[in-house]
Structure formats: structure tokens, C-alpha cells
Amino acid sequence: MPGASIRIEFTRSYQMMNFLKEVPSFHVVLYLQEKGLQYEGSSPAHFKHNHLVMSEKLFKVIIIGDPTVGKTSFVQRYVQDTYRRDYKGTVGVDFALKIIKWSETQTVKLQLWDIAGQERFTWMTRVYFKDAHGCIIMFDLTNKNSFQNTLRWKKDVDSKCMLPDGSPIPCMLLANKCDLAERQVDQMEIETFYKDHDFIGWTETSAKEGLMVADAMRFLVEVMLRQSGLHSISPNMLDTVDLKPATPASSSCPC
């Protein structure tokens, strides 16, 4: 009917994108509940080229582990691409924000919570962990004790954080300081450990040299997007680092 229009509601961005592939050429109003946004157009091409705006997704990521394993250096390298030798120990929690243009239609904002590893702050973890979407648990390859303590950190996260469906939040295991020659933890030990304790992946990193920092975070973001229902709208996901559940990262630090 001339002049008629219809309204279609979607709960997720990817549902709207899939609909646009098949939408006929009549006046249509699309409403995206996820963002509370409404788009209007007279044809698929008009809609996609003139009315589809960048949507945003905010994720809270907690970075935890023993003191001096390199959590603050990791965050600074990832957010600002800088490294300093004179970092002071974190008191309580520090915050940083990273904004990523994930695709032509999706921006990801990462709220990074760098949480102190000292025992005197652990009683606050329930507050710090609240509403987290993902987690980095880090240890120092030159400190065996920091590796053994990752199990305590993982159990603490699993007991206090969960997704809406009741499953644990995704946790990455990072073996930092791979630029140092003296190691106390070998790869096979890490491989067995991460499989036994339900990490989504692991890799060696060097916050000092910037090795595998961005790659590890990109892998975590991909998992969080997939769990939030937005995986299919990001064409750049094919470029993510391959951290397969069955093997350590093939592109881990070549040290």
C-alpha cells in the first residue's frame, strides 16, 4: 500500500543486520532494543548507507594476579603503548579505558580494572569483580609461586562472577615476562593447567616488549562479543589471534 510502513523490533544488532540482507524495498522502521535506537529508510540500500550508525558495546575486564607480575605494565602497554620501569604497586584498583573500532558498525569500549594483588586488598574483590564481563589472570614466568597462585585467583573469580546464564565469565591466562631468560614454569605445565581449570586460552606475553599484548586482548574481546550475541556482525574477527583451546598460542613470545 502506498505510504504504508511497518515497524520491526530486534533485540540484537546482528539480527537487524541479517534482516537487512532480505528486506524488501518498502518503507520500514527498524527498532533496536539493545541500544534503544530507531532507524528508518525506504530501501535496504538507503538504510544501510545513510541510517546505520556505529553502535557501542561496553565490557568490564578485570586484570588480576599476584603483586609484581606485570598487570599495570600490561594495561599501560595495551592502552597507551608505553612501558615504564618505575611503576609503583597498585593500591586497591586502577582504571583505564580502551576504545576499539571493531568493525564498520561496531565500537567496543573496554573498561579495564587493574586490581591490586596484595593480600590485604583481597577482601574487596567481590566489589571489584561486580558486573565483570571478562578476566585476565596473569603470572610471572620467572616466579613459580605466582603461577601456582593463579588457581586461587581463578576460584575467586568463578565464585563471585558469572554471566546472565549462570556460566563463568571468560578468563584468559597470561604468562608474562617472556622476554626474560630465567624461567620457572614450562609450557607443557601451563598447557595442562589451563585445560584443567577452564580458561578460554593462554599465551606468553611481554608487557615490556609489547609481545602478544594486543593479540591476547583481541582474543578475549572476540569471546565476550560472541557471548553477548554480537559475534556475527564483526568481519574483522577472522583476523584475531588463534588461541585454540587445545594448544598453546602458536604465536607466543619467541624468546
Image (cartoon, helix red, strand yellow):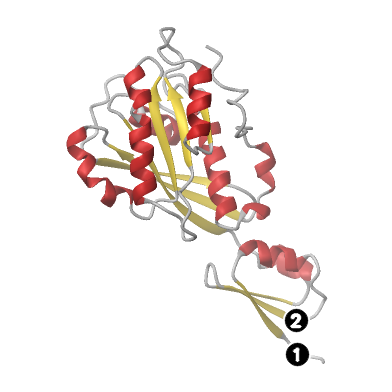
In this view, the residue farthest toward the front is 196
The reply to whether residue 165 is in sight is yes
Q: Amino acid at mark 2?
A: His
Residue carrying label 1? 4
Q: Secondary structure at mark 1?
A: loop
Q: Quadrant of residue 120?
A: top left
Please tell me the numbered disc located at residue 46: none
Q: Is residue 35 left or right of residue 67?
A: right
Decide: marks 1, 2 in contact (CB < 8 A)? yes
Q: Amino acid at mark 1?
A: Ala
Rounded to the nearest angstrom, the CA distance separating label 1 from label 2 is 7 Å
Q: Quadrant of the N terminus?
A: bottom right
Residue 124, horizontal then vertical, whole percent: 22, 46
Above or below 155: residue 180: above
Dot 2 crowding, Cα within 10 Å, few <14, some 14–19, many 20+: some
The residue shown at (53%, 32%) is: 195
Camera-side residue of 88 and 226: 226
Q: Is residue 66 left or right of residue 28?
A: left
Q: Quadrant of residue 247?
A: top right
Q: Secondary structure at mark 2?
A: loop
Residue carrying label 2? 27
Above or below 223: residue 64: above
Residue 231, horizontal then vertical, whole percent: 63, 52
The residue shown at (32%, 21%) is: 145
In this view, the residue farthest toward the left is 120
Above or below 158: residue 39: below
The residue shown at (20%, 39%) is: 121
